[in-house]
Image (cartoon, coloured by chain):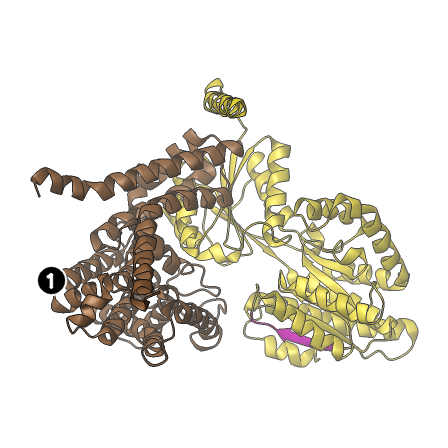
Chain colours: A yellow, B brown
C-alpha cells in the first residue's frame, strides 16, 4: 500500500510538473521547420533517416525548432502538409521523397505564401517551392567504375546491381552504373595492359520493401560469379548483404570480396565494416540542411536545385564519413558503440587491400564528371534507356 | 416495461461506451506521462485536430468514410453469426476494380456508377470462395478470410506492377480518370462525396436487416441458430447472403477511398492508402455495437482519432508511434463492452453444446 502511495505521489508530481511546465514559458526559437515523411517512415537507416539527420543538424546550427510529421497512410500526405501550412507556424515545410509529389503540387497552390521544399522531385515548378534533385547517375558511374576495377583485380568477371521497382528514377542508377563499368574496364586495360572484360548482371526486383527478393537476386548473381553487388533498392540491401555474408561463410571467410556497394546513406559500417566496399552517398541530409540554411539566412529560392558530385550532393564514401555514419548506425540501433573500433579497423584493412591506382582512378573520374569532361548518360531517360543499354551493354 | 426502464435500456450502451472511453483516455494519459509528454496538451490537440474546427471535422469525416463501409462488412456477418474478417482483401480488390473501369471512356455520372458497381461486384466475387469453402467443405470463415486477404494483397501488388501500371510512374496504377472521380464536398480538404455513398450503404443495410424478411432470418440465425433451424430458416442461404453483402460494402470501401481521396486517385504499390482499413473496420463495428447507426458514430470517432493524431505529432510533438499506441488503447477499451458480449454469447453457445452432447 505504501509503495502504491509513493507511486501515486510520483505520478501526481509528474502531472503537476508537465502541466505546469509550459505555463512558465520556453525560449523563442529563431524559426520553425516541419519535416513531412512518407509511409516508409523513420528507422530505414537510409533515405528518411538521412532527411531527418540533415534537418536535425540544421535546426541545431541555426537555433530553429524542428517538427517531424510521419505519415501513417498515403491518405495522410495531403492533410499533413495542409495542417502544417494552415497552422501558419512554419518558416519552411519540407516533404521528404517523391511519394509526396502529388500532395505537394496541390498544397503549394493552396498556400502561395508558405515556403515549401521537396526532395527527389524536379518537375512541379511552383513559385513557392524549392525542388531538390540528385545526380544519382553520376554517383552510380563512380561506383560502377570502382566495381569494374575491383572485380578485375580480384579475378571476378561480373559485377551486379539489384534494383527496386522499374521506375525512371532507377534508370538513372542503371545507366550511370553501365557507363562506369565500361569506363572502369577501359581503365583496367590501360593500367594493367591486359584486356578487361567485366560484365554486368542486373535485376529489377519490383519491390522496395521485400528484403527476401534482394537476397534471392544477390544469390543468383553470386552463383554466376559476381564479385560485387550494388544495392539500388533501399532496405533490400539488408538481404543483399545477408546473401554475401552467407556466401563468404560457406567459404569460411568473413571479409569480402564479394562486396556490396551501399546506397543513399553511407552503409560501409554494415557487414562488420569489411563487406561493404563503398557507398554511393546521396546526401539527402545535405539537401535538407542546405534548404533550411537558405531559409535561415534569407536566401531561399524557388525552382529546381540539382545536387551532384561537384557540390556535395553525391559522393563516394570516404574515411571522414565513416565515423559520422557509425554514430548514425548506433542511433538507428543497427550496431553498438562496442563495434566501433573493430568496424573502423576492418574498413581500413578492406580499403587498403584495394590497390591505390583504383582509388586514384575513381578520383580521376569524379573530377572528369564534375568538370564535364566525362558525360554520364541519363539525366532522365524514361524513353532512351534501351538505347543506353545498347551503347553500354551487359 | 415502463418508459423509464426503456430509456435506461437504451442509454445503457451509450453510458458504458462513454465510461470505457474515459478509462481509455486516462490510460493513454499515463502512458504519455511515462514517456514525458504532456497529456493535457496532447489531448487538446487531439480534440482540435479531430472536432475542433470546420476543417478538422471534414478530415475526420473523410477518414470515417471507408471505415463505415468496412465496419458494415463485419457487422452484417456478426448479425448473421459469422466472423467475417475478409473486408481487408475485398477492399483491395474493390479498389482495383474501380481503377480498372477507368480504362473505358464514359460520361461522368455513368462512369462513377459503373466504377462503384464494378467494385461491389469485385468484392462480392472475392468473398464467394469463402462462402463456397464454408458451404461445401466446412472451412471456418476466419481461416479462409485471412488467407484470402493475403491472396488479395499479393494479387494487388502484381496488378499494380504489371497490369494497371502507370506508364511513367511504375510505383502506382493509372490514375482514375476525371469522369470517374468523386468530387470534394469541401475544397481544400480531402472530404468527398464518398461519405454520402457510405451513409446510403449504412441506411440500406439498416433497412435490409430490420425491415425485410431476409434481414429478419439473418438476425434470427445469428441470434439463435437452433431456433432458426427449427423455424425452417436455411443456414446455408444465410452464409451466402452475409458474405455477399459484406463483399459488396468492402468493395465499395476500396472504391470510395481510391475514387474520392485526393490527390493521386490511384492505388500505390504497397497499398499505403488502403492497408488496415478492413481491420480498423472491425474495431469500428465493435464500438458501434454492430448497428449501422452506431457504426456511423463510431467511424466518425475513429476517423477523428486518426485526424487528431496527425496534429498531436506537431503540437506537443508526440511521435507517430506513440500516437498509434494511444489510439490503440482508446479503441481497445471502447471495444471491451462489445467484446464481453461477444465472448459471453460464444461461451453460452459452447456451454449449451456441451449440454446437448450430454457430457
Q: Residue at x 15, y 71 (%)?
A: B231
Q: Residue at x 38, y 64 (%)?
A: B88
Residue A149 in which image quadrant: bottom right
Residue B210 appears in the picture as rendered? yes
In the rendered structure, does residue A204 fall within the stretch colored magenta? yes
- Please give the chain letter of the residue carrying mark 1: B
x and y, in percent, of residue A358 in the image: 86, 64
x and y, in percent, of residue B109 in the image: 21, 68
In the rendered structure, does residue A296 fall within the stretch colored magenta? no
Dominant secondary structure of the residues highlighted in magenta in the image: strand
The correct choice, above or below, for A21 with respect to B207 in the image is above
Q: Residue at x 34, y 65 (%)?
A: B84
The correct choice, above or below, for A380 with respect to B163 in the image is above
x and y, in percent, of residue B134 in the image: 34, 75
| In-front residue for pair A24/A279 | A24
| In-front residue for pair B1/B103 | B1
Is B91 situated left or right of A141 in this image?
left
- Specify the farthest residue to the front: B358
The correct choice, above or below, for A64 with respect to A178 in the image is above
Q: Give the residues drawn in magenta, as a range.
A: A200-206
Is A105 situated left or right of B194 in this image?
right
Is A215 situated left or right of B56 in this image?
right
- Specify the farthest residue to the right: A193
x and y, in percent, of residue A27 in the image: 54, 23
Q: Which residue is mark 1?
A: B211
Q: Quadrant of the C terminus of chain A?
A: bottom right
Secondary structure, mark 1, is helix
Is A138 situated left or right of A11 in this image?
right
Amino acid at each position: 500500500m505504501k509503495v502504491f502511495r509513493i507511486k501515486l505521489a510520483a505520478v501526481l508530481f509528474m502531472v503537476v510538473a508537465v502541466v505546469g511546465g509550459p505555463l512558465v514559458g520556453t525560449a523563442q526559437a529563431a524559426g520553425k521547420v516541419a519535416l513531412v515523411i512518407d509511409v516508409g517512415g523513420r528507422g530505414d537507416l537510409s533515405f528518411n533517416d538521412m532527411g531527418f539527420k540533415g534537418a536535425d543538424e540544421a535546426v541545431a546550427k541555426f537555433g530553429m525548432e524542428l517538427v517531424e510529421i510521419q505519415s501513417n497512410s498515403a491518405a495522410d500526405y495531403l492533410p499533413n502538409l495542409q495542417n502544417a501550412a494552415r497552422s501558419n507556424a512554419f518558416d519552411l515545410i519540407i516533404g521528404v521523397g517523391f511519394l509526396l509529389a502529388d500532395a505537394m503540387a496541390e498544397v503549394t497552390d493552396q498556400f502561395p505564401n508558405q515556403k515549401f521544399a521537396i526532395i527527389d522531385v524536379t518537375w512541379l515548378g511552383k513559385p513557392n517551392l524549392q525542388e531538390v534533385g540528385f545526380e544519382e547517375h553520376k554517383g552510380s558511374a563512380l561506383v560502377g567504375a570502382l566495381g569494374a576495377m575491383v572485380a578485375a583485380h580480384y579475378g571476378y568477371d561480373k559485377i551486379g546491381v539489384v534494383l527496386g521497382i522499374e521506375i525512371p528514377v532507377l534508370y538513372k542508377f542503371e545507366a550511370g552504373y553501365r557507363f562506369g563499368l565500361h569506363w572502369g574496364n577501359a581503365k583496367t586495360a590501360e593500367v594493367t595492359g591486359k584486356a578487361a572484360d567485366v560484365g554486368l548482371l542486373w535485376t529489377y526486383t519490383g519491390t522496395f520493401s521485400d528484403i527476401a527478393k534482394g537476397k534471392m537476386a544477390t544469390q543468383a548473381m553470386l552463383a554466376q560469379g559476381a564479385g560485387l553487388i550494388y544495392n539500388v533498392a533501399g532496405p533490400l540491401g539488408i538481404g543483399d548483404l545477408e546473401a554475401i555474408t552467407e556466401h563468404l561463410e560457406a567459404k569460411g571467410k568473413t571479409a569480402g570480396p564479394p562486396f556490396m556497394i551501399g546506397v543513399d546513406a553511407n552503409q560501409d559500417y554494415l557487414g562488420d565494416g569489411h563487406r561493404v566496399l563503398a557507398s554511393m552517398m546521396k546526401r539527402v541530409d545535405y539537401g535538407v540542411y542546405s534548404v533550411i540554411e537558405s531559409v535561415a539566412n534569407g536566401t531561399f529560392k524557388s525552382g529546381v536545385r540539382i545536387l551532384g558530385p561537384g557540390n556535395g550532393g553525391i559522393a563516394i564514401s570516404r574515411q571522414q564519413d565513416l565515423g559520422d555514419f557509425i554514430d548514425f548506425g548506433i542511433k538507428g540501433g543497427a550496431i553498438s558503440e562496442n563495434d566501433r573500433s573493430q568496424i573502423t579497423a576492418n574498413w581500413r584493412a578492406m580499403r587498403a587491400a584495394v590497390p591505390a591506382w583504383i582509388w586514384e582512378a575513381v578520383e580521376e573520374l569524379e573530377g572528369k564528371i564534375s568538370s564535364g569532361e566525362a558525360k554520364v548518360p541519363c539525366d532522365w531517360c524514361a524513353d532512351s534507356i534501351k538505347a543506353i543499354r545498347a551503347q553500354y551493354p551487359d | 416495461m415502463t418508459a423509464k426502464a426503456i430509456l435506461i435500456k437504451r442509454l445503457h450502451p451509450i453510458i458504458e461506451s462513454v465510461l470505457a472511453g474515459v478509462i481509455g483516455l486516462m490510460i493513454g494519459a499515463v502512458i504519455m506521462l511515462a514517456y514525458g509528454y504532456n497529456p493535457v496538451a496532447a489531448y487538446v490537440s487531439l480534440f482540435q485536430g479531430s472536432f475542433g474546427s470546420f476543417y478538422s471535422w471534414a478530415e475526420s469525416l473523410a477518414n470515417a468514410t471507408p471505415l463505415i463501409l468496412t465496419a458494415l462488412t463485419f457487422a452484417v456477418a456478426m448479425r448473421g453469426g459469422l466472423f467475417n474478417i475478409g473486408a481487408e482483401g475485398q477492399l483491395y480488390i474493390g479498389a482495383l476494380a474501380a481503377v480498372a473501369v477507368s480504362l473505358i471512356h464514359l460520361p461522368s455520372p455513368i462512369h462513377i456508377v459503373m466504377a462503384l458497381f464494378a467494385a461491389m461486384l469485385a468484392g462480392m466475387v472475392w468473398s464467394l470462395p469463402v462462402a463456397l469453402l464454408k458451404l461445401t467443405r466446412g472451412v471456418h470463415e476466419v481461416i479462409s478470410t485471412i488467407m484470402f486477404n493475403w491472396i488479395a494483397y499479393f494479387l494487388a501488388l502484381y496488378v499494380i506492377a504489371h497490369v494497371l501500371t502507370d506508364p511513367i510512374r511504375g510505383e502506382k496504377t493509372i490514375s482514375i480518370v476525371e469522369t470517374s472521380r468523386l468530387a470534394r464536398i469541401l475544397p481544400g480538404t480531402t472530404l468527398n462525396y464518398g461519405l454520402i455513398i457510405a451513409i446510403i450503404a449504412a441506411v440500406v443495410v439498416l433497412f435490409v436487416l430490420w425491415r425485410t424478411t431476409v434481414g429478419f432470418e439473418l438476425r434470427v440465425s445469428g441470434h439463435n441458430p437452433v431456433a432458426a433451424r427449427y423455424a425452417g430458416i436455411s443456414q446455408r442461404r444465410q452464409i451466402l447472403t452475409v458474405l455477399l453483402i459484406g463483399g459488396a460494402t468492402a468493395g465499395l470501401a476500396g472504391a470510395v477511398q481510391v475514387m474520392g481521396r485526393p490527390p493521386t486517385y490511384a492505388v500505390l504499390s504497397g497499398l499505403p492508402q488502403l492497408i488496415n482499413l478492413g481491420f480498423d473496420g472491425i474495431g469500428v463495428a465493435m464500438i458501434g455495437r454492430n448497428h449501422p447507426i452506431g457504426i456511423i458514430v463510431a467511424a466518425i470517432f475513429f476517423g477523428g482519432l486518426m485526424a487528431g493524431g496527425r496534429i498531436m505529432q506537431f503540437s506537443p510533438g508526440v511521435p507517430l508511434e506513440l500516437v498509434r499506441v494511444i489510439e490503440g488503447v482508446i479503441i481497445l477499451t471502447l471495444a471491451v463492452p462489445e467484446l464481453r458480449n461477444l465472448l459471453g454469447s460464444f461461451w453460452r453457445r459452447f456451454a449449451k453444446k456441451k449440454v446437448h452432447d450430454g457430457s
